[in-house]
Amino acid sequence: MKLRIVVLLLAGLMVFTIHTAGKVKKERPLVQMAILLDTSGSMEGLIEQSKTQLWKIVNEMALAKREGLSPRLEVGLYEYGKDSIPKSEGFLRMIVPLSEDLDRISEELFKLKTNGGSEYCGKVIQSAANELNWSKRTDEFKVIFIAGNEPFTQGEVDYKIACKEAISKGIIVNTIFCGDYESGIRTFWKEGADLADGKYMNIDHNRKIVHIPAPQDQKIIDLGKNLNKTYVAYGKGGSAKKERQRRQDKNALSMSEEAMVQRAAAKSTAQYKNVAWDIVDAEKEGTIKIEDIKEEDLPEEMRKMSIKERKEYIEKLKKEREEIQKKIQQLKKERDKYVAEKRKKMAGENTLDTAMITAIREQAKKKNFKFEKK
């Protein structure tokens, strides 16, 4: 009798294990990207392009899928080549470590100022490869983009050693020379990329980004503003981060309508998450339970609600957000089609976003990512 009970218990456990195994949530793949920008005196155009095109690059990653899942995107930011940073520190500075907080990346880009200096490419690549918290997994897409216009050979750290160190950790190094193609080759930017399985590209960093107005633009911008109303700040510093979200909308719009459209579209993707301060994202991702949030950490409008009312309130905002995001994504598809037709009649753009997107598409495919058609 006892043996029969044990057998039945074991059989039941096996059935339960098999049943629940299929329900295990798959982990989203990770993309880690470090952007190293030359902020010496002649690089104002590069900084302007980076401010304008950050959200376009995020939208490109939103098109990527591996095994049907959108990747998590972490971005890190360095500046190098500025005299106001001590030589003992290599004239370079880590601005933001690898982070999913894209509003913070945007905020820091808008703070960047140029200043004359020495550009130590080897040193900044080595610093990024060693200081950032890169994934140890070999199947993740890990990439450095370095952009500048001085010889790749400057500084005490040999670029050959730095690039080899990076690729030994599975970190691809793509080099973007701000100037003509042949000059970049002569000053070893191509060799740096070759050593780390990367792609060498050149751009016109002073070229103005061309905005092609589309019928969908204003609708996307308005929906992007409405999206902000679905965010509920909580905890220490939450309200300040929500205010930062609003400021980055304002910063994007100050650059161009194109930048604002791209930002609004990016906010509708899986890459734009704010689990550290937004209750809707945090509850959806399972990092908090509404009933566990202390009353003093809640926004004023939620403090007098019961637990049931708080849950209903967050669920309502979650559904509103999803509906707005779907509308933005549909409009974005229509806009992309419209703009693509217009661009056929124009010369190709030789700008930062074009270079980065070209490399991302080629290299992410080698990590088994597939990109949806625009």
Image (cartoon, rainbow, N blue to C red):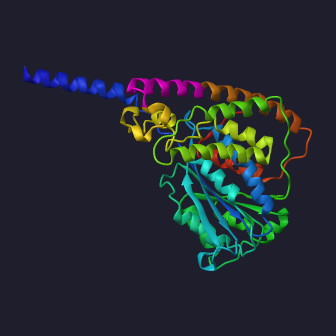
Percent x, y of residue 279: 48, 36
Percent x, y of residue 290: 41, 33
| Residue farthest left in this picture | 1
In this picture, residue 283 sits left or right of residue 199: left
| Residue farthest right in this picture | 345
Percent x, y of residue 54: 70, 48
Quadrant assignment for the C terminus = top right
Q: Quadrant of residue 82?
A: bottom right
Quadrant assignment for the N terminus = top left
Q: Is residue 259 visible?
A: yes
Residue at the image point whose x is 18% and y is 21% from the top:
8
Asked whether 104 or 240 is in front, the reply is: 240
Q: Which residues are magenta?
A: 304-322
Q: Is residue 201 visible?
A: no
In this picture, residue 313 sits left or right of residue 50: left
Asked whether 54 or 352 is in front, the reply is: 54
310 within the magenta span: yes
Q: Quadrant of residue 19?
A: top left
Q: Quadrant of residue 243?
A: top right
In this picture, residue 175 sits left or right of residue 366: right
355 in relation to 335, above or below: below
Residue at the image point whose x is 68% and y is 34% from the top:
224
Query: How many marks on residues?
Result: 0
Residue at the image point whose x is 40% and y is 28% from the top:
22
Percent x, y of residue 114: 74, 66
Q: Main secondary structure of the magenta part?
A: helix
Asked whether 251 or 274 is in front, the reply is: 251
Asked whether 345 or 226 is in front, the reply is: 226
251 within the magenta span: no
